[in-house]
Amino acid sequence: MRNAATEGHTDLRTWLGAIADLAEAVNSTGSVHSLLDLVARTACRLMSYDFCSVMLPDPTHQVLAIEGACGLSAGYIRGVNIKHPVRIGAGESGEAPSSRAFRTGRAVALSDVTAETHYAWGGVAERQGYRSIIAVPLMASGSCLGTLTCYRADVHEFSDDEQELLTTLANQAAIAIETARLRDREQQTIGELRELNDSLREQHALLRRSEDIHRQLTEVALRGEGVHGVAQALAALLERPVLFEDAYGSTLAAADAGGAITDDRFDGADGFSALRRSLTETAAAGVVETREDGSGTPWATCAVVLAKEVVARIWTPGDVVGLGPLGRRAIEHAAVVAALEMLRECTAVDVEWRLRGELLTDLLAQRPAAMATVVARAARLGHDLHRAHSVLVVRADTDPVTPASDRGTDAPRRVLSAVHTLAIRQTPRPLAARHGDDVVVLWPVDHDGGNGSAGEPPTAAAGAAPEAVAAADAIRRCVVRALPITVTVAVSRPCADLADYPAAFRTTRGVLTLTQLRGRRDRTVELGDLGVQGLLLQLEDPSELLRFADRVLAPVLDYDRRRNTRLLHTLRTYFAHGLSTARTAEVLFVHPNTVGLRLKRVEELLGVSLTQPDALLRLTAALAAIEVDGLDADRAQESPSQRPRGTRQG
């Protein structure tokens, strides 16, 4: 196969060896890029060319780029690929031989590129040092994969035999390239399948572990272990301490990594209290990570949602990434189980609170039919009414002039929840129930109340039992820890007989009302703290006392009503601040001279002098009667004839 056109080319054995090298390269683990370089080197060696390149189209099939080469400089390759790309199709500078060969599927040769007036790559050709060029298509399966482009340094006419030999080599190279690409795609597919298989195994393991988590937490719910059981199981699963708190920030349950119940880890954490309060109302989906002020120890948290309302929150120290998918799934599942446990507990607590409320109402109403069973019903609820009890009336501290509808309907319930938390730890068990807007607690005390001989009922002069006062203080502390409010607690004398409770409740509620009307907050009070008002509260029929108050204060009441003034309010403030004009003016935010003029008008209307002891005594008694009757300054504007007789608001 030697002639003038193919002089210098190798024999058939060499050709077959070159084809074998290409086949071996396809079967090796080398890249497609290395195969393309081999194709270019083989063409140079077999055809005695100075340079060769393999050009392939870009993904958009707009340009051809040199992907494999032999003998070409890096500068030339960059010049063609970046500065003067070979566009597929005719451009402003004409069409390159490689583009024409790629489009037509036939070999294209230029014997002397310097003779071509529209050859745009003359500059790079001169620097690379070639004069002639031939481009043959890489055909495989009826489509063109690219071109094999070869260069000679001298002017050269490419004969038909030479083009045929080069085309044969190009076709073999195309088959090798397509095979290599198929091999790469197969390897990629195998790799993707291997990754998918590994992922499926991981997912299967996660699913099995998730089912195990579901089983463990569900068993906790089925055993009725409550939120404490959920906390212990979750802490053991996560190997982290966890905390469950209610919507108000009070601890429901806490456990360390070993499952032991403890909340020391959380109480001692820097900034955690503020952080937990800031997110109490947030119901972000799933497990989220948060930090105090964006720094410090990260905390993972998850809301416990019931009926689209955040009823609790789960906390655990550490970032969310460290939990992993199983840890996050465990927390989310624990939130669901905790919601069901809280629903069950709330339902049971609601029933229990309703029964206790009905029991307390019957005890205070003293209906004969209900009283026949009240002791037995109390015993079934765990309360012994054979013991003496002090009546504790607990009320949230709010502005007394604010309507009850504006004070928040959940405040009594929240207070009852805090009191209940304290009461369930006491032996014998106190009875706590809601009564209107108040929480009433019957607190067991010694029979003598600490004021008499054992076994004897308390005397009328006896005060509140020390243990009842201590219980009231404990209730106030418990509420402050659990809620963003304070309460005032009034304590009665011990009640040794069932018939004592109605009067004890009325008197104690009156003590509480008077205390809050005087602007006093967050304290424990008893009847003896009120002085004269305390004595008046014990009257069963205050009608005559109220008529006396009307007779004494009628001129001032009528004057205030007609002139829309506040003389009575000024008088009460004057008496409440030790007959000091200066202190009265400071409280009322007026000038002392104004207070003096108002008091002088009171003296003129009543025909008395506020310096006379007898007048001071009469006015003190009248004001005390009005205060005990529950009249505030606004109601005092009514005339005596408008006010009901013989009624008490305390």
Image: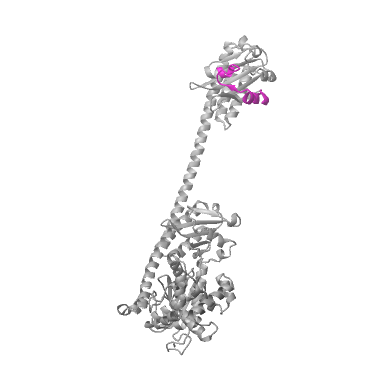
Q: Nearer the viewer, residue 493 or 77?
A: 493
Q: Is residue 449 magenta?
A: no
Q: Nearer the viewer, residue 278 or 203?
A: 278
Looking at the picture, how far across and down is residue 594, in whole percent?
56, 72
Q: Quadrant of residue 19?
A: top right
Looking at the picture, how far across and down is residue 226, in whole percent?
43, 64
Q: Quadrant of residue 555?
A: bottom left
Q: Is residue 89 magenta?
A: yes
Would you place residue 529 above or below residue 407 in this image?
below
Say which quadrant the N terminus sits in.
Answer: top right
Question: Along the horizontal axis of the image, is 204 left or right of 150?
Answer: left
Would you place residue 178 above or below residue 545 in this image?
above
Say which quadrant the C terminus sits in.
Answer: bottom left
Q: Which residues are magenta?
A: 71-100
Can residue 393 be seen here? The reply is no
Question: Along the horizontal axis of the image, is 283 left or right of 644?
Answer: right
Can residue 82 be seen here? The reply is yes
